[in-house]
Amino acid sequence: MNASHELDLDTGEAFTGRPTRALRRARMADNLVTGLMWAAALLLVVVLLAVVISLLAAGLPTWSIPFLFSAGTFLNPGILPQIWVSFYTLILTMVVVVPIGTGASIYLSEYAGPGRVTSVIRFSVEALASVPSIVYGVFGSIVFLTNLQLGYSLLSGALTLALLNLPLMVRVGEEAIRSVPNSYREGSQALAASKWETIRKVVLPSAMPGLLTAIVLTSGRIIGETAPLILTMGTTISPNARYSLNPLATGETLAVQIWAIKSVGMPGVPRAQDVANGAAAVMLFIVLAINVLVAVFNSRLQKRLQGGNLPPRAGSSKRGGG
Amino acid sequence: MSDKDFELKAVHGQGIAGPGRGPGAREGHSEMPPSEIEAREFNFYYGAFHALADINLAVPRHRVTALIGPSGCGKSTFLRSINRMHDQTPGARSTGELRFGNEDINKTSDLTALRQRIGMIFQRPNPFPMSIYDNVAYGMRLESQRTPKAEVKERVEKALRSAFLWDEVRDKLRHSGLALSGGQQQRLCIARAIAVQPQVVLMDEPCAALDPIATLAIEDLIHELEKDYTILIVTHNMQQAARVSDYTAFFTTDESRTGQLVEHGPTQTIFTNPRDRRTEDYISGRFG
């Protein structure tokens, strides 16, 4: 290491060949902090690996064709009905969350001026985002089950999950739309585009990667949510309503099934714990798969939009060259 | 102050000697052509801040007019009011007249029609994150300017040719506009602006983010565009103003930071024989 020599020369101090005490101390502090941050980052990787490895070790042995792709038998249950319910719930919820959430994001980032109404909306979003999910479950059971008479059903569950996820979708979506450089909006307006045309043709496509991130985050939560679903969707799938498209049927998602097995058990089924472990590994797989799919899609989209370059950020002075 | 007299004279092209050519400009027109845009007692405010006071300025048709002056003198504010880019700015308002043809830009209700006829190029190249072709076709695909497909294709090529970009991008029209270099991006933005066939092109320091070579390419382009378009260009670069413009308007600020027009005339006159001391100081680098 000859950094100390250069530094001495740079600062014009007498060249002694040895770093000064202050310099040594500064360098030690620097190394210490760098090391700590590196360790913190490494810890995250270790945790992820631990989760993946332990779940796979516990769950993979259970995996089999009948386990993954059928309802199985009483003694050897399969989880396809639960997988079906999970995805169907995901879709039902997204049908509500994506349009409303995107609409609210657009309103907050593009239309809402400073003022009372905006602050009320913003406060509501923040407040809703911090409400615990079980509270949404209780709310859903009051409104959807009792008031609207929807009963324990996929629809009640999906609507409850929609309420739960809207604030997250709005916050991340608004952030994504705000990060679109203002120069795009100006450029579009200067070409005589209306505000809505500007949003539709320039702003939303540019915000798409961020909006997709919002969708992934909410998807993960929908796949994994249990508490509100137990109160609104139920914990059983009626054998004659398997793979049903009827939104008024009761249902049980993978996550709820795991909870049910681990807390209540499956009377008379000795392999119950294996089923729960296998289902947990499947859930992990689904969530990782959604992440990877969207990442791949996003990088393709980025390439098509930006031609490999990063989008210009307001205030940056990069790419000044000709 | 007798400034106003000078300004009014400038508007009517009186009391200005010389052939009226910028040092680097082509030979030709000597007498001031009819004006395309004319500001009369134009004032602009950002809330309580008086940004521009009593601007009287005629912008001649199919000529390049440079707006110069120290930072914060309101030249960009003036430029941006010509296509109403301030409409979204809270508290922005203006008084006086800004004539464009038979209408007053401040009062026009049809912003779309106005912006179709007055295009704008920004300081930082801002191609949209879409293909080169889609960038140029953008205006023609808007609801208000819907153009038949075959014609779009034709006009995209024409606009790219006019912007001296066609030869460089003809084989990669489907590539993203953001994959181009900074200078090419700015020429793409110019192509995008002229593809909708405006009468006026506003340029807000179009070369500020470009290297000298790319800057020269844009300046050549401006000379070429002058044949078909009225061009207003804001620049901080004196040499650039001298090279590209036929007319120059010098703005400055008073003690309360309100922008005003000091003088306006043929570029050569402003640069070699300015009437106002402040212009002379600015141009010779003693100020600003």
Image: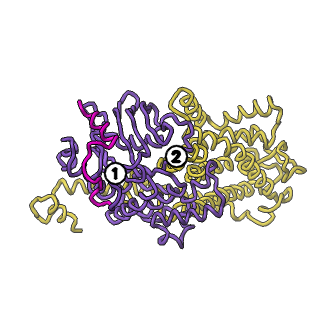
Chain colours: A yellow, B purple
Tag 2 subunit: B
- SS type, badge 1: loop
Q: Quadrant of the N terminus of chain A?
A: bottom left
Q: Which mark is residue B115?
A: 2
Is A181 colored magenta in this rendering?
no
Q: Quadrant of the C terminus of chain A?
A: bottom left
Q: Position of residue A219 (x, y in %)?
A: 66, 50
Q: Is residue A241 above or below residue A72?
A: above
Tag 1 subunit: B
Q: Is residue B202 left or right of residue A78?
A: left
Cα separation, mark 1 vs mark 2, equals 29 Å
Read off the residue under disc 1: B31
The one of B130 and A167 positioned closer to us in this rendering = B130
Q: Is residue A62 left or right of residue B77?
A: right
Give the residue displayed 83% in from the left and 32% down from the top: A149
Q: Residues within 10 Å of mark 2 (few under 14, many from 20)?
A: many
Q: Position of residue A72 (x, y in %)?
A: 84, 59
Give the residue displayed 76% in from the left and 38% down from the top: A232
Q: Amino acid at mark 2?
A: Arg
Q: For residue A138, what is the image quadrant?
A: top right
Q: Earlier in the sequence, mark 1 or mark 2?
A: 1
Q: Is residue B188 above or below residue A133?
A: below
- SS type, badge 2: helix
Q: Which mark is residue B125?
A: none
Q: Position of residue B259 (x, y in %)?
A: 31, 36
Q: Residues within 10 Å of mark 1 (few under 14, many from 20)?
A: few
Q: Is residue B191 left or right of residue B284?
A: right
Mark nearest the camera among 1 and 2 is 1
Is B21 colored magenta in this rendering?
yes
Q: Position of residue B145 (x, y in %)?
A: 61, 51
Question: Which residues are drawn in magenta?
Answer: B1-25
